[in-house]
Amino acid sequence: MNSPVLPTDLESDNRLIRRRVKIQIPQKHHQQPFISQLASLYHLKINIVGALLGQDGIGGGWFDLELEGRSQQVKNGLIFLIENGIIIWQDSIRQYDGW
């Protein structure tokens, strides 16, 4: 599988970034509000770019997300997902000056 362990390419200066990731939430976690928790616990803005869910909760749910926040917040949010058994595929990181 193509699942990175941790994002190592995040800036250490804690700049505002956008990170595009695809995640798979296993069926056993369908009732857990992981995406909502990313927003509330790690103060991230989240754009759900795409999603694929099995009918009646069968199989895993796949989400294409754009996460926006300080690099440390994004890193901590991704660690939270990994620690909870969520599979993550990295796409890209964009940094910007916040305006």
Image (cartoon, helix red, strand yellow):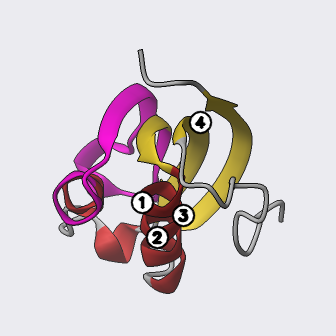
Q: Which residues are magenta?
A: 39-64
The residue that mark 4 highlights is: 20
| Residue 92 at x, y percent in the picture | 72, 35
- Secondary element at image label 2: helix
Q: Amino acid at mark 1?
A: Gln
Residue at 83 percent of width and 65 percent of height: 1
C-alpha gap between disc 1 and disc 4: 14 Å
C-alpha gap between disc 2 and disc 1: 5 Å
Q: Amino acid at mark 3?
A: Lys
Residue at 59 percent of width and 43 percent of height: 21
- Residue 96 lies within the magenta run: no
Q: Residues within 10 Å of mark 4 (few under 14, many from 20)?
A: many
C-alpha gap between disc 1 and disc 3: 5 Å
Q: Amino acid at mark 2?
A: Asn
Q: Nearer the viewer, mark 4 or mark 2?
A: 2
User: Does the CB distance between marks 2 and 1 fall below 8 Å?
Assistant: yes
The residue that mark 2 highlights is: 76
